[in-house]
DNA sequence: CCGATTCGTAACTAACTAAGTTACATGAAA
DNA sequence: TTTCATGTAACTTAGTTAGTTACGAATCGG
């Protein structure tokens, strides 16, 4: 895993969970898919559990499963549950009395608000089911193991 | 300066430059506005010079000035010249043969492309002149030094 | 020409963030 | 009651960015 790849790593994991809905996958198995550590996986998707996107169970036969059908899980929800901001730039005031800064922040905050609305709207139209369908299409086309490397 | 505040810091600097178009401002003066180091300023806005947004001159009376009128400088250009990406998430392949990863990356890259198009379009409608006007409006309203801290 | 000024840039340090790791408590199933 | 799996805290490591120091190159005034 590298910097800011949490969204794509999480989607990868979720597609695998969608692809094996009948059984729970352990964080060790999930970690294997994205070549990382089970603890990192648990930490990363802990927020998804709180959002009801996934469920986890302990002990024998425990692990992770989707909390609802893939077509009811949008990328907007997933991104939100990860707690990442779509827009990275900061607008923290650093010279509270400066009117130039106030003007800059006002314009930038307006833009951020509008941008977040736009992006969330787009992401809310893409579901985990779309991703899974895309994966299956590729699988049928090439006919090769989903983890050939 | 803190993390990812480069866009807002740069805008702050540029508004000051737009506000004193007749004379060059040194990187020392510009650094004072955003409470940082002259070298950091030079490094940060070096990209703007290459994009023609600002010009710099050395020696006595040297410093920085806008490269063209504020209403001809859009936030899209500035953001681009800073070399920052608007969308932070990574889609670097990490398991090249994995079809799940390929599906995830395909969807995410599509989204990123569309999102960048949308955001750039919005930013291209905001100019440095808009920011300067907003600053002047605040200044006239409150009637206070632009750097009262 | 000389000295002051200012940018350009390399090299280093410090601070911060996120991933990776270890360790162990908690809970569930066989 | 043993084994397996999550939950989470604490620590380590790696990578990024801001900040700093230093100095060469260019420009201007005298």
Image (cartoon, coloured by chain):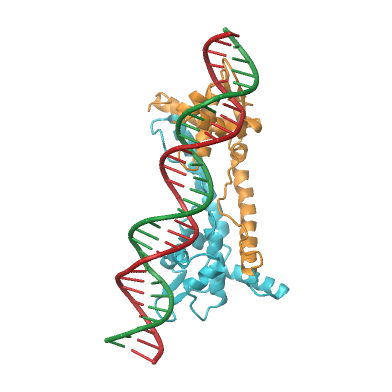
Chain colours: A orange, B cyan, C green, D red
Residue B148 found in image quarter: bottom right
Query: Could you tell me if residue A132 is visible in this image?
Result: no
Q: Who's the residue at 53% across and 22% down the image?
A: A26
Q: Who's the residue at 57% across and 47% down the image?
A: A86
Residue B73: where, in percent of width, then height?
A: 52, 68
Q: Who's the residue at 61% across and 59% down the image?
A: A108
Viewer-proximal residue, B20 or B131? B20
* Residue B95 vertical placement versus B63 (above, below): above
Relative placement, left or right, of D13 versus C23 is left
Viewer-proximal residue, A6 or B32? B32
Residue B99 found in image quarter: top left
Residue B24: where, in percent of width, then height?
A: 48, 78
* Viewport quadrant of the C terminus of chain A: top left
Residue B68: where, in percent of width, then height?
A: 49, 73
Residue A125 found in image quarter: top right
Viewer-proximal residue, B56 or A15? B56
Relative placement, left or right, of B146 versus B62 is right
- Give the number of callouts: 0
* Residue B48 vertical placement versus D12 (above, below): below
Viewer-proximal residue, B100 or A107? A107
Residue A43: where, in percent of width, then height?
A: 56, 33
Query: Could you tell me if residue A139 is visible in this image?
Result: yes
């Amino acid at each position: 895993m590298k910097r800011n790849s949490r969204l794509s790593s999480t989607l990868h994991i979720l597609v695998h969970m969608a692809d094996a809905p009948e059984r729970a996958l352990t964080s060790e198995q999930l970690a294997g898919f994205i070549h990382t550590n089970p603890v990192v996986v648990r930490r990363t998707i802990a927020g998804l559990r709180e959002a009801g996107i996934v469920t986890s169970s302990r002990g024998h036969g425990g692990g992770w499963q989707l909390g609802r059908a893939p077509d009811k899980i949008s990328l907007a929800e997933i991104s939100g549950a990860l707690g990442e901001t779509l827009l990275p730039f900061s607008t923290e005031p650093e010279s509270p009395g400066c009117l130039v800064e106030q003007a800059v922040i006002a314009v930038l905050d307006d833009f951020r608000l509008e941008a977040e609305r736009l992006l969330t709207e787009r992401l809310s139209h893409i579901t985990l089911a779309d991703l899974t369908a895309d994966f299956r299409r590729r699988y049928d086309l090439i006919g090769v193991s989903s983890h050939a490397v």
